[in-house]
Amino acid sequence: MARSSLALYGGSLSLLTDLYELTMAYGYWKNGMQDWEAAFHVTFRKNPFGGSYALACGLHSVIEYLEQFEFRRDDLDYLATLQGNDGKPLFSEEFLHYLSGCRLTCDVDAVPEGTVVVANEPLIRVCGPLPQAQLLETALLTLLNFQTLIATKAARVCQAAAGDPVLEFGLRRAQGIDGGVTEARAAYVGGCFGTSNVLAGKLFGIPVRGTVAHSWIMAFDDEREAFEKYARAVPNNVILLVDTYDSLVGVKHAIEVGRMIESMGFRLAGIRLDSGDLLTLSRKARQLLDEAGFQHTAIVGSSELDEYVISDLKRKGAPINVWGVGTKLAVSYDQPALGGVYKLAAVRKPGGEWEPRIKLSEEAIKISHPGRMQVRRFALNNTFAFDVLYDVDEGEPTRPFVDYHHPGITIDPGDAHPVEDLLVPIFRAGKRVYDPPPLAQVRERAQQQLHSLPENTRRLHVPEPYRLAVSSRMQQVKEAQIRLQRQRVQAARERYGLS
C-alpha cells in the first residue's frame, strides 16, 4: 500500500481521540459490557457546498490507522496520569491493562474512495466489540470528514474548468502539515491534475508543478533580467509570473525571453496571471502571445479562484488554459467542515440478536437510522438513478422503497436496475481483506462516478437532489423505534412533571 500522511507522525495514533471515547469505553468495561457487540456508521447530514453529492475520500488513511491500532506503553503511561475531579486516577490499572491488549477485531465495511455518495448514506460501517468500536469514532471522523470535503470541492472546481487542467496550490494556506498533505491527495482524487506540494508528490506520486514566485522577480533590478536568469537556469520549466509590476509589460518581457530560449531549443511553456481583471488581462495576453507567434504558450490563471469564479470566466470566454487554485480549495473556504457523524445503530448482547438503536431529535435531520446499513445503487441507461438504504439482515432491500425525505412517497424503480452495493468489506475480525487500489485508479473511479451522475444533479447552481430511498423494512423499524422512544420520553416527562 502506498504511503500515507499518517506516516508523518510515526508511532501510535491511538490517542488521536476525544477523551469521552475513552471514558465511555471505560464505562462499558466497568459495567461488564466489553463482550457486547455494536454497529456504528459514519454518515453526514447535508451535502456540502449546496450541492447534491459528495465524493468519498480518506479510506486509505483509515486503513493505515486501523492496521496500526494499539495502545503502546507511552500511551498508557500518559493515560495513567489523567485525574478525575477528586484528584485520583481517572482510569484504573486494570482498565489500562485491558487497553494494552486491545487490537482491532472489528468488521469494517466502507465505500471505496472516489465513490459518489449523498447525505445520510454510510461511508463506513463498524461492527465489533462495543468499547473498541466506540474508541474508533473520533479518528475515523477526522480522517474521512476533511478528505471527503476537499475531494468534493476539487471535483466541483474541475467541473467548472471544463477539461482544463487544475493545479492545487494551497499548501501555504493549508491547516498545518497534515492539512496540506492530505488536502493535496484529496484534491487529486477529486480531479486536480497536480500539486505544488512536493511532499505530497513524494508520498503519493502526484505530479508536482511550479516555477517562480514574485520574490524571484523582486530579487533582481529588472523584471526582464529576472525572467532571463530563470529561463537560463531552468529552461525546461519556464512558466513566467507576469504580474509583479504590470501584467502586459510582463507578457512582453516573457515573449522576449521566449524567443531567447527558442534559440536554445526550448519553449516558453506558459505565463501566469495572479492578480487583476483576469478576463481582460487574459484576453490581451493571449493576443500579444499569438501575434508574437507563441500560440503554444499557455496562460495560467490563479488569484483566489474557486468553482464559481472559474465558471464565470469560462462562460465569458477567458482564454485561460490552466487554473491554479489555492486557498479556497485547500481550506474549503466556503464550507470548512463536512459535519460527518458516527452513530450507534444496533447492539448485540452475548448470545443474543441484533437490537436496533436510534437517536431522536427535535430536528428531523438529526434522527438516526437503526440497523446495520448497506446502500444499493440503481442505474438507468448508465446513469445513476437512486440509492436504497437497507439492513444487511434483509439480504435484499424489501419493497416498496420509501422516499428518505418524504416517507409518504414510494419510489418505483421502473426500468432502473441495481448496479452495486456501496459498502464493501475492508476488515474481517480485524484482518484486512481489501487491497486499496493505486491512487491513479481512485482518481479514475471518481471521474467515472461523477460522469454517471445525472447532469442536473452535478450542476453547480441549484442542482436537483439525488434520490435516496429506504427499504420498507428499515422504514418500519425506524418508525417503531421512534414510537417506542417517544413513549418512553413521554412517560418520563409525566413522571417528572414536565410540561
Image (tube, rainbow, N blue to C red):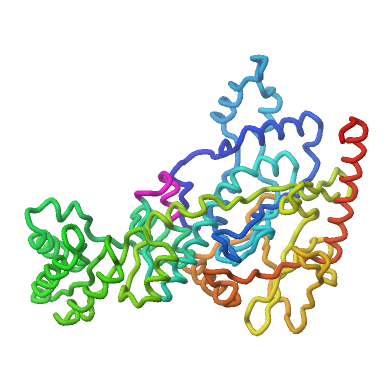
> In this image, 50 relative to 205: left or right?
right
At a point 71% along the width and 34% down the height, the residue shown is 25
Task: Assign the magenta stretch its main secondary structure.
Answer: helix
Total of numbered circles in the picture? Answer: 0
> In this image, 142 relative to 298: left or right?
right
Q: Is residue 405 visible?
A: yes
Q: Residue furthest top?
A: 87
Q: Which residue lies furthest to the front in this view?
A: 499
Q: With respect to residue 172, does 262 lie above or below? A: below
Q: Can residue 202 be seen in this view?
A: no
Magenta residues (range): 172-184
Q: Residue 120 lies in what quarter of the image?
A: bottom right
Spot occupied by residue 178 in the image (x, y as percentages of width and height): 44, 47
Q: With respect to residue 463, does 96 lie above or below? A: above
> In this image, 52 relative to 213: left or right?
right
Q: Residue 400 lies in what quarter of the image?
A: bottom right
Observer-nearest of 30 and 73:
30
Determine if the magenta segment contains residue 355: no
Instruction: Name the quarter where the C terminus is drawn.
Output: top right
Spot occupied by residue 290 in the image (x, y as percentages of width and height): 19, 81
At a point 9% along the width and 63% down the height, the residue shown is 224
Determine if the magenta segment contains residue 180: yes
Spot occupied by residue 108 in the image (x, y as percentages of width and height): 68, 54
Observer-nearest of 197 and 79:
197
Q: With respect to residue 11, does 404 lie above or below? A: below
Observer-nearest of 324 and 97:
324
Spot occupied by residue 140 in the image (x, y as percentages of width and height): 60, 48
At a point 30% along the width and 62% down the height, the residue shown is 209
At a point 63% along the width and 57% down the height, the residue shown is 46
